[in-house]
Image (cartoon, rainbow, N blue to C red):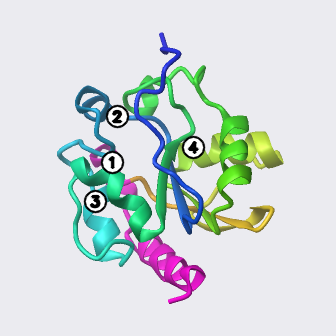
Amino acid sequence: MPSEEPVLPDIVERGVVTLLCGSAAGAVSARLGLPYAGPGNKFWPVLAEAGLTPRRLSPAEFRELPRYGLGLTDINKTESGADSDLTGSGDDAGALVAKIEMFRPAILAFTAKRPAQVFLGAAFGIARVDYGVQEAHLGGTEIHVLPSPSGLAVRWWDPSYWHALGERHRERAGG
């Protein structure tokens, strides 16, 4: 049963270029209170490899992301676990729209297909989601869908989408 309190806090502030949105906190992340903390998760290494951060950060450094123009949230703030464990009762596309309207990031990048499908389905009626830049925009915010960095999603892993996001992030950041 989902709690009413967020499992992990949002890390977002005005001026972020890219807001990264996951599905929900994984089991290890929820237990440790640190995003993308599972031992097989590629999130932190790929941020550095794609040039989104200047070095590999540890999960404990998640509050540093805004200094690199990055924000962090989840479509489901009240449940945790693998996507197959989520009931979806905590999915909240409306809350994500409100965050986009408040913080106005240049890019919204989903870190897996599930949160993208939830959001794009609710906001635009889109049923099929592919990786990459989406045709749909929310105001001036472009939308990207990335392969999940979770160790559970290794068969779909393709870092090229993350590298393309890094290039676009630098363009939108002005350098």
Q: Earlier in the sequence, mark 2 or mark 4?
A: 2
Q: Is residue 141 above or below residue 153?
A: below
Q: Is residue 175 left or right of residue 132?
A: left
Instruction: Give the number of the disc on residue 103.
Output: none
**Residue 171 within the magenta-colored segment of the rendering:** yes
Q: Earlier in the sequence, mark 3 or mark 2?
A: 2
Instruction: Give the number of the disc on residue 115.
Output: 4
Q: Earlier in the sequence, mark 1 or mark 3?
A: 3
Q: Residue at x 23, y 32 (%)?
A: 32
Farthest-out residue, bottom? 175
Q: CA distance from mark 1 to mark 3?
A: 11 Å
Q: Residue at x 40, y 57 (%)?
A: 156
User: Dot 1, how many residues are within 10 Å of its Cα: few (below 14), some (14-19), or many (20+)?
Assistant: many
Instruction: Give the number of the disc on residue 150.
Output: 1
- Residue 82, image quadrant: top left
Q: Are marks 1 and 2 in contact (CB under 8 Å)?
A: yes
Q: Residue at x 31, y 67 (%)?
A: 46
Q: Secondary structure at mark 4?
A: helix
Residue corresponding to mark 2? 26
Residue range highlighted in magenta: 149-175
